[in-house]
Image (tube, grey):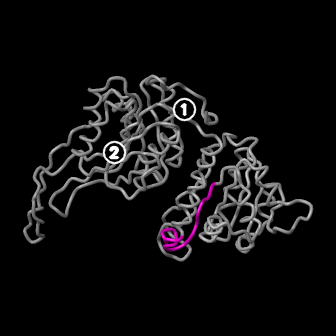
């Protein structure tokens, strides 16, 4: 279930552009979520979009006429008045064709003409099939739009309309709403802070071609790094092997093993004011490394002797000066007792506990269902949230602790950039 509405967009006027993709039907759900959050939404559809879903659906839910034709109103120049009155323009879904139009300045219908007149935040939620997202032309158009200040979300990976599995699905409603919130209600409440984040798995070698690892995708740590950076912090991300893009403005220190992660974190710990240990560091590693590939016929892997790795967070906690320490407890059983035990045993300020066996909250998912436990004894249970939105909730919980120096509690939603 989506989280309960908070009316965060009350009084905001949003233009929702819908282009010709099979994902156009998902824009109905997004429209409903926007109106539930208090937004006044006007919908603009391309002619191709009307072939996938009728305008009447959007008209009923938005309580506004749906605009589809550049010449439908002789009394009102919609391509001018709609963007002038809008606080944000959101295009969902945005096809590869639409990205090309906006990048090249083509204006052959109402929506593309409207975009040329946008001076408010422009948020694009792509949806496309096959390898289109990674096509050099599409990449070039994205780069142009990024430089012009547009927010372009990454499409999700999964089953596509063609039957293929790939990256091209329209981002989840929660991800789009979070992006709108970041542009309309930007916060700089972490300005001046230095945040050290660990993310992803580690890989512990058995021989030159084999290793032991875990199922961590790194998505939560990367979401935290992105959130802290967007809220004004300097961020260093120490990451195990992942396929994730580096968040803009974040320094990346790539590592592979638990030992490498320990060294990287130790090298930056004194610099940091907050440490967020989101990585899934291997608890054990092979005791012996074989320099040549072990042949299957040798039977040498019938027994694999392991030794424990260093508990990095526990060691860093002993060296802390004024840093805030945030840990994670990934569980397959009772979450709260284990989170409390970890908080007390390691002397942490905040622990984020989640059941990785729960539906929609496992490794590699784009959502988490978490419980936050802090050093004051406060317990906050959060429903299933997109990881980017959960990252903000975690940062808010750190603010609520009132330290380190310079961090002060601010109401959720913040304000405009200073």
Q: Residue, x 49% and y 35% (percent of image)? A: 395
Q: Nearer the viewer, residue 138 or 237?
A: 138
Screen quadrant of the C terminus: top right
* Chain part drawn in magenta: 123-137
Q: Which residue is mark 1?
A: 189
- Helix, strand or loop at disc 1? loop
Relative horizontal placement of residue 400, taking residue 8 as reference (left or right): left
**Magenta span includes 386:** no
Q: Which residue is mark 2?
A: 238
Relative horizontal placement of residue 156, taking residue 150 as reference (left or right): left
Q: Residue, x 31% and y 33% (percent of image)? A: 269
Most extreme residue toward the right, as rendered? 75
Label at residue 64? none
- Up the image or down, 411 lies above or below 15; here it is above
Q: Residue, x 20% and y 42% (percent of image)? A: 309
- Helix, strand or loop at disc 2? strand
**Magenta span includes 131:** yes
- Up the image or down, 257 lies above or below 378; here it is below
Residue 176 image offset from top left, x and y in percent: 60, 53
In space, the residues marked 1 and 2 are separated at their CA atoms by 23 Å
Relative horizontal placement of residue 337, taking residue 147 as reference (left or right): left
Residue 170 image offset from top left, x and y in percent: 58, 62
Residue 219 image offset from top left, x and y in percent: 43, 51
Relative horizontal placement of residue 263, taking residue 119 as reference (left or right): left
Q: Nearer the viewer, residue 375 or 358?
A: 375
């Amino acid at each position: 279930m989506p989280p309960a509405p908070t009316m965060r967009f009350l009084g905001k006027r949003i233009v929702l552009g819908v282009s010709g993709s099979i994902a156009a039907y998902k824009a109905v759900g997004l429209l409903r979520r926007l109106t539930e959050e208090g937004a006044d939404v006007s919908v603009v559809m391309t002619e191709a979009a009307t072939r996938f879903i009728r305008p009447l659906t959007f008209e009923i839910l938005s309580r506004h006429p749906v605009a589809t034709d550049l010449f439908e109103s002789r009394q009102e120049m919609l391509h001018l008045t709609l963007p002038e009155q809008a606080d944000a323009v959101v295009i969902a879904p945005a096809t590869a064709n639409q990205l090309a139009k906006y990048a090249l300045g083509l204006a052959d219908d109402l929506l593309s003409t409207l975009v040329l007149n946008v001076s408010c935040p422009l948020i694009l939620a792509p949806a496309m099939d096959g390898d289109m997202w990674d096509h050099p032309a599409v990449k070039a158009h994205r780069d142009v739009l990024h430089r012009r200040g547009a927010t372009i979300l990454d499409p999700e990976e999964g089953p596509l309309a063609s039957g293929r599995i790939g990256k091209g699905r329209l981002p989840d409603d929660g991800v789009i709403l979070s992006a709108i919130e970041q542009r309309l209600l930007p916060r700089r409440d972490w300005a001046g802070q230095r945040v050290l984040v660990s993310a992803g798995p580690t890989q512990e070698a058995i021989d030159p071609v084999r290793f032991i690892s875990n199922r961590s995708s790194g998505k939560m740590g990367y979401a935290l790094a992105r959130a802290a950076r967007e809220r004004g912090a300097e961020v260093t991300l120490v990451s195990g092997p992942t396929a994730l893009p580096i968040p803009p403005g974040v320094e990346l220190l790539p590592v592979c093993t638990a030992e490498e992660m320990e060294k990287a974190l130790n090298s930056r710990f004194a610099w940091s004011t907050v440490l967020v240990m989101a990585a899934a560091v291997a608890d054990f590693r092979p005791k012996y490394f074989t320099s040549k590939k072990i042949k299957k016929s040798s039977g040498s892997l019938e027994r694999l002797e392991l030794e424990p790795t260093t508990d990095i967070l526990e060691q860093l906690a002993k060296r802390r000066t004024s840093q805030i320490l945030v840990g994670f407890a990934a569980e397959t059983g009772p979450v709260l007792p284990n989170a409390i035990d970890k908080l007390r045993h390691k002397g942490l300020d905040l622990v984020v506990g989640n059941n990785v066996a729960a539906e929609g909250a496992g490794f590699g998912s784009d959502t988490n269902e978490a419980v936050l436990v802090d050093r004051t004894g406060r317990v906050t249970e959060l429903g299933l949230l997109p990881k980017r939105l959960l990252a903000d909730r975690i940062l808010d919980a750190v603010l609520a602790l009132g330290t380190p120096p310079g961090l002060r509690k601010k109401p959720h939603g913040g304000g405009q950039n200073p």
